[in-house]
Image (cartoon, rainbow, N blue to C red):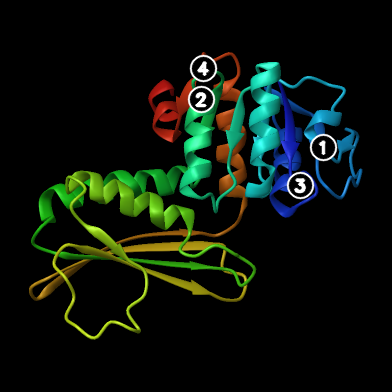
Amino acid sequence: MTRIAVTGACGRMGRVIVSLCKERGDCEIIAGIDKLGEKYDEFPVYKSVFDMAEKPDVIIDFSHPSALPDLLSYGKMNNVPLVIATTGYTDEERSQITAASAQIPIFFTFNMSLGINLLVELARKATQVLGGQFDIEILEKHHNQKKDAPSGTAIMIAEAINEELDGKDHFVYDRHSVRKPRDKDEIGMHAIRGGTIVGEHDIIFAGHDEVITLSHSAQSREVFAVGAVNAAVFLAGKPAGMYAMSDLIKEN
């Protein structure tokens, strides 16, 4: 039985994770961490990760980038693995996550959906075949409360594509002030915010007289919560290192 603590426990994703764990027999929520400190279930909710009386097997983080320093410190001090599912990290914060993975196991991905991670692999394959001949654009859509743009998932997709292009392309996030034709070596990134869109990502490969589009649409936040819980169960007991969805898929 994997004992899990959830940061951001009082938020929408935190509550979905709690609900999912109740339906499973391989894990349980033993504590929540949330700045609101609002108790809404059988487990205690603390305002700080350092206030926890319990020691979890894994912490799932669906909170805010500002919580990262405390999470990494707690994880390293107590040898507790972390599933980091929050988005919007800076390059410096991502470097801190990577550095911490030398001491503790960390599962980090911009998107916990199995479908999205399959989309990334399909984008890699398409780039191997089409790269250099087709222009590549990424369009992402999210709800009107999402703060970061472009989404972490869009960045993950773009970075995976650029790896296949040997890192030679550059990202263009906005063209309203650019008065020139599109560069050959660029990947366009476009963000739409509106309504209650959970998450949609399109990868457009535009060539001469033909267009290929790879798409993924999330219909509910539950797909991300399922991935996070699966990651937590997978991560428990693993040695220090950086883990991603590809590792979980290989083990299964």
Image position of 173 (left or right of 22): left
Q: Dot 1 corresponds to which residue?
A: 48
Disc with the residue nearer the chain's start (2 vs 1): 1
Q: Which residue is mark 4?
A: 240
Q: Are marks 2 and 1 in contact (CB under 8 Å)?
A: no
Q: Is residue 3 above or below residue 46?
A: above
Label 4 is placed on what type of residue? Ala
Q: Is residue 210 positioned above or below 150 on the image?
A: below
Q: Give coordinates of residue 74: x percent, y percent.
A: 71, 26
SS at mark 4 in the image: loop
- The x, y position of residue 66, in whole percent, is 67, 48
Q: Please tell me which residue is depicted at 67% across the width and 28% down the height of the picture.
A: 73
Residue at 28 percent across and 82 percent down: it is 178
- Look at the numbered discs 3 and 2 and tell me whether their residues touch, using CB distance below 8 Å: no
Q: Real-space Cα distance between discs 4 and 3?
A: 28 Å
Q: Position of residue 214 (x, y in %)?
A: 30, 59
Residue type pointed to by label 3: Arg
Sequence-wise, the earlier of marks 3 and 2 is 3
The residue singled out by tag 3 in the image is: 15
Sequence-earlier tag: 3 or 1 = 3
Is the residue 104 above or below the residue 13 in the image?
above
User: In the rendered image, which quarter is residue 186 located in?
Assistant: bottom left
